[in-house]
Image: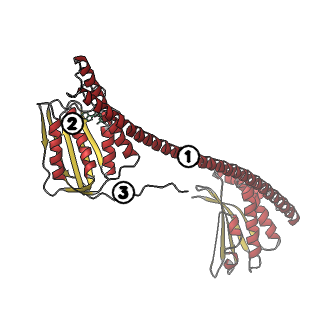
């Protein structure tokens, strides 16, 4: 890296403190330092000069231009020994980019470095020669001139500080206004959210109340309907009884139709009542140790009695002796009966089977009811668990209310388990009841506070 001395001077007497300040500013301006940095360097130099003046002997000052990247202006001062401690850590170091001080028994050396700004006129040799001539041509002014310059600098610095302070105050005001606006907005949003939550709470309480009212209504209505429907069925029996007055053929057919319809109605009413009871939380499982082998045997008998098609084979595998589960036997039997009845109802030929195996990943059982019947399209696997839903076309020629599966699912949930389905149209369906061997005691019903 090449460097060129722009100016040399000596520090001998008090007057030189003004001279070095003045020269420093001139050189700094000539090499392209910004106005503020010119004042900084000039101030640093006069401070260093003030401290060095009492040191015996002259001090030599050299202003050096370095053509590196970035280009720098370095002021090198060599003074008598013993002054390093005076300068180290002083305010001058904070005014320039770096200030290095070192000393030995012969001399104290100080280097003040200022980086030239990017975009300053490049320091070519030609330019440095020009700068040298320019600096040499300037005659140092009197201390009074320098004082006047310093005053001007001080005033403009003070002016600048005030402007900055005003700007800062303005910015602060702006920030405060923004902050207030934001916190107001936040507060409003919060109020909105709280209101929304309250509304949601209210709505869900309303929904709960409506659903409870519906269940109560269903339970009451179906209960009230049961007696008259049962009476109608009884009366049709009476009419058809051999002890009664004989009926014409036409009359006998009508009475048969009435009995058939009334029986369907009773099934619907009973199903509705069951479901409504389960939904209203009025079903309390009677927990006991259920012998699964015995239960399977009982269901085998029931299923066999309802199979009417010769091409359907029933396979109920005996569970290993001693297989038990903690459950409500009547409710569990009801679930499996519903699944078996469906399997038999929707299977023209093939097999309907029921089997037991240990559940994977938990202490429990999986009871699988499988058939080779009409199957259920995958997009309806959830819908068939909704009340009254029947797969379109599946019920032609079959009886049913669409309440069996939702009821079965309620009961399985009540027993602490879950009900799953895999099925493919045309191939068959597999309903799986997963039951924990020891269900958690049911959580106490939640009460509304207040
Ligand atoms: P229901 O059998 O009284 O119609 P469910 O709630 O038990 O009512 O069943 C709802 C619907 O699900 C049935 O109508 C039928 O479309 C379909 N489904 C249930 N089980 C089977 C099955 N094993 N195979 C084919 N479809 C079934």
Question: Which circle marks residue 304 in the picture?
Answer: none
How many numbered marks does the figure carry?
3
| Element type where label 1 sits in the image | helix
Structural crowding at the residue carrying mark 2, measured as other residues with C-alpha within 10 Å and reported as few (<14), some (14–19) or many (≥20): many
Residue on which disc 1 sits: 202
Q: CA distance from mark 3 to mark 1?
A: 27 Å
**Along the polypeptide, which appears first: circle 3 or circle 1?**
1
Q: How is the image coloured?
A: secondary structure
Disc 2: residue Cβ within 8 A of ligand 1's nearest atom = yes
Which numbered disc, 3 or 1, marks the residue closer to the eye?
3
Residue on which disc 3 sits: 442
Horizontal and vertical percent position of residue 20 = 77, 66
Which quarter of the rendering shows the N terminus?
A: bottom right
* Residue ID at (88%, 64%): 144
| Element type where label 2 sits in the image | helix
* Residue ID at (13%, 46%): 317
**As drawn, 292 above or below 50:** above
Quarter of the image for residue 425 reads: top left
Q: CA distance from mark 3 to mark 2?
A: 31 Å
Horizontal and vertical percent position of residue 177 = 73, 50
Question: Which circle marks residue 343 in the picture?
Answer: 2
**As drawn, 347 above or below 5:** above
Nearer to the camera, 182 or 12: 182
**Along the polypeptide, which appears first: circle 3 or circle 2?**
2
């Amino acid at each position: 890296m090449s460097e060129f001395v722009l100016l040399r001077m000596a520090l001998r007497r008090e007057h030189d403190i003004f001279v070095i300040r003045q020269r420093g500013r001139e050189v700094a301006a000539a090499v392209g330092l910004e106005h503020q940095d010119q004042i900084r360097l000039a101030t640093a130099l006069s401070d260093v000069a003030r401290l060095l003046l009492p040191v015996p002997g002259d001090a030599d000052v050299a202003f050096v231009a370095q053509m590196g990247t970035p280009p720098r202006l370095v002021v090198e001062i060599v003074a008598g020994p013993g002054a390093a401690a005076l300068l180290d850590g002083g305010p001058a170091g904070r005014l320039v980019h770096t200030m290095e001080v070192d000393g030995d028994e012969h001399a104290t050396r100080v280097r003040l470095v200022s980086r030239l700004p990017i975009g300053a006129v490049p320091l070519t040799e030609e330019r440095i020669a020009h700068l040298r001539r320019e600096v040499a041509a300037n005659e140092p002014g009197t201390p009074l001139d320098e004082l006047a310059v310093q005053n001007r600098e001080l005033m403009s610095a003070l002016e600048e500080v005030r402007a900055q302070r005003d700007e800062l105050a303005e910015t602060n005001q702006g920030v405060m206004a923004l902050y207030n606006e934001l916190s107001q907005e936040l507060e409003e949003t919060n109020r909105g959210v709280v209101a929304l939550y309250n509304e949601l709470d209210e709505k869900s309480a309303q929904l709960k109340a409506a659903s409870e009212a519906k269940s109560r209504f269903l339970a009451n209505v179906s209960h009230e309907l049961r007696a008259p429907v049962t009476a109608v069925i009884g009366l049709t029996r009476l009419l058809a009884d051999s002890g009664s007055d004989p009926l014409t053929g036409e009359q006998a057919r009508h009475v048969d139709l009435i009995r058939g319809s009334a029986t369907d109605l009773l099934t619907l009413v009973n199903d509705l009542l069951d479901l409504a009871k389960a939904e209203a939380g009025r079903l309390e499982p009677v927990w006991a140790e259920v012998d699964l082998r015995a239960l399977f045997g009982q269901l085998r008998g029931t299923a066999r009695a309802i199979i009417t098609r010769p091409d359907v084979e029933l396979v109920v595998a005996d569970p290993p002796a001693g297989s038990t589960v903690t459950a409500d036997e009547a409710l569990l039997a009801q679930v499996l009966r519903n699944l078996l009845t469906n399997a038999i109802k929707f299977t023209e030929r093939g097999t309907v089977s029921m089997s037991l195996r240990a559940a994977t990943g938990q202490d429990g059982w999986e009871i699988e009811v499988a058939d080779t019947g009409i199957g259920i399209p995958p997009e309806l696997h959830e819908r068939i668990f909704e009340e009254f839903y029947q797969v379109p076309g599946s019920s032609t020629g079959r009886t049913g209310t669409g309440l069996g599966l939702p009821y079965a699912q309620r009961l399985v949930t009540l027993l602490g388990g879950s009900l799953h389905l895999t099925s493919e149209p045309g191939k068959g369906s597999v309903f799986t009841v997963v039951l924990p061997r020891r269900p958690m005691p049911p959580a106490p019903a939640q009460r509304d506070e207040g």
